[in-house]
Amino acid sequence: MQSFTAKFDHFVLAIEGESIDELLESLRLMWRSREISIEVSCANNIMMDSYPGTVGQIITNFCQNTMLHAFKDREIGHITITCCQRDNLVEIVFADDGIGISKENLERIFDPFFTTSRHQGGTGLGLHIVYNLVTQKLRGNISVNSTEGLGTRFTLLLPLKVSGN
Ligand SMILES: Nc1ncnc2c1ncn2[C@@H]1O[C@H](COP(=O)(O)OP(=O)(O)O)[C@@H](O)[C@H]1O
Ligand SMILES: [Mg+2]
């Protein structure tokens, strides 16, 4: 059994007619029969003039990491995605209640080629790419909090409008 919750109408990803519901629907295939729930809560009046595909790529990357790392060897897990507007910024928080990341590793997760899964096919490039997309293409910033055994939380702060877009 798989549970899946996504509730809201206009997410930031709805800019080019692509909604996060559709994205999550396809990501759901990743978890196959595991009982991973995704709960999305988002104010429905946020309108971004940015790159929806890039935001989608970032969320996809986070989801892949929950699969590979956070919920490795686990049958049950919860993911929450929340977004809200703060003045001319959008805050997107992606959180899981998986294994978490040690303090030592936390300082290195955005480094290119840093991976704890070298033998399981990890390249260590996922979060490095995310970091570059957030800071360069989306002109925002990213921070991470994690407690071993409790989970991991990524916070993105993105400008509502990316100039030149
Ligand atoms: N949600 C998560 N929970 C626990 N560990 C994570 C999570 N996301 C990333 N990590 C850690 O950060 C490292 C780097 O992630 P990433 O750059 O995506 O590389 P890769 O997934 O190829 O290992 C991972 O190897 C893992 O140790
Ligand atoms: Mg990865």
Image: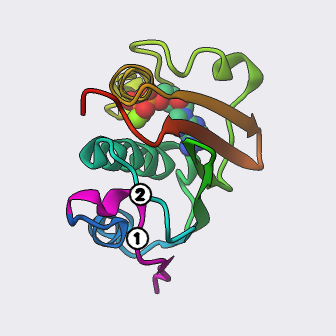
Q: Image height check: is 156 above or below 40?
A: above
Q: Is mark 1 on a helix, strand or loop?
A: loop
Residue marked by disc 1: 10
The residue sitting at 33% across, 25% down in the picture is 137
Q: Which of marks 2 and 1 is in front?
A: 2
Distance of label 2 from label 1 (alpha carbons): 8 Å
Instruction: Write the residue at 56% across / 41% down.
Output: 89
Contact flag, marks 2 and 1 (Cβ < 8 Å): yes
Foreground of the two, 33 or 5: 5
x, y percent for residue 113 = 39, 14
Q: Give the range drawn in magenta.
A: 1-16
Direction from residue 15 to residue 150 in the image, left or right = right
Q: Is residue 117 visible?
A: no
Q: Quadrant of ligand 2?
A: top left
Mark 2 Cα shell of 10 Å, populated few (<14), some (14-19), many (≥20): some
Task: Based on the picture, tell me whether residue 12 belongs to the magenta stretch.
Answer: yes
Identity of the amino acid at label 2? Met
Taking 41 as reference, is 115 left or right?
A: left
Reading the image, the residue beneath label 2 is 47
Image quadrant containing the C terminus = top left
Amino acid type, mark 1: His
Q: Is residue 62 above or below residue 83?
A: above
Q: Is residue 82 visible?
A: yes
